[in-house]
Image: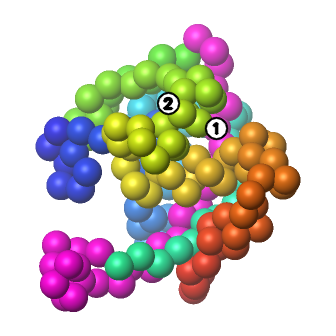
Amino acid sequence: KTKSKFPSMLDHIVAGGQPAGLSLLDNVIKECEEEAGIAEELTRRGIKPAGVISYENYGGRLKDEGEGVMNRVVLFCFDLMLPKDFVPSVNDGEVESFFTWSLEEVAQSMHPEYDDPIKPNCYPVIIDFMLREGHISPDSPKYLEIVRRLRSGPCC
């Protein structure tokens, strides 16, 4: 509720900006501990790099008046396997609570008419996961367009 961007919206279990001077893996370990109480050992045991997403968007509070800003976004994605009985803990005050959804519930949340509780930058990560895990078939309409758009922004 107190976050400056997208308060009270659903987010990934762990996410965060990449600080200078810290490796991607060290940052994931830090964010896991800070945001969800996931111990370093558990993170190291279950973490797997899953690729990168890049895109551009036009936003800002004056975007409708033509005074917005262009954002270039690069998201490094990791999959984290946790024990079934693991319960994350709210540690840093940015999270109200944690809960799980089935893959079916996640897929339902992607429908355009769904009451949109998810942070906008989570959707590309969810779609990428569903593609990688085969939950979106290559036979799906516009499959190649979806894949292309997930890597449409410059990465450097």
**Residue at horizontal 53%, vertical 74%?**
55
Amino acid at dot 1: Leu
| Quadrant where the C terminus is found in the figure | bottom right
Residue 15 appears left or right of 104? left
Residue to which mark 2 is pinned: 38
In the image, the segment drawn in magenta is 59-85
In the image, residue 123 above or below residue 94: below
Q: Are marks 1 and 2 in contact (CB under 8 Å)?
A: yes
Q: Which of 24 and 138 is in front in this view?
A: 138
Amino acid at dot 2: Ile
Mark 1 against mark 2, which lies toward the viewer? 1
- Which tag, 1 or 2, sits closer to the chain's start? 2
Residue 118 appears left or right of 26? left
**Residue at horizontal 59%, vertical 61%?**
76
Residue to which mark 1 is pinned: 80
Image quadrant in which you'd find residue 108: top right
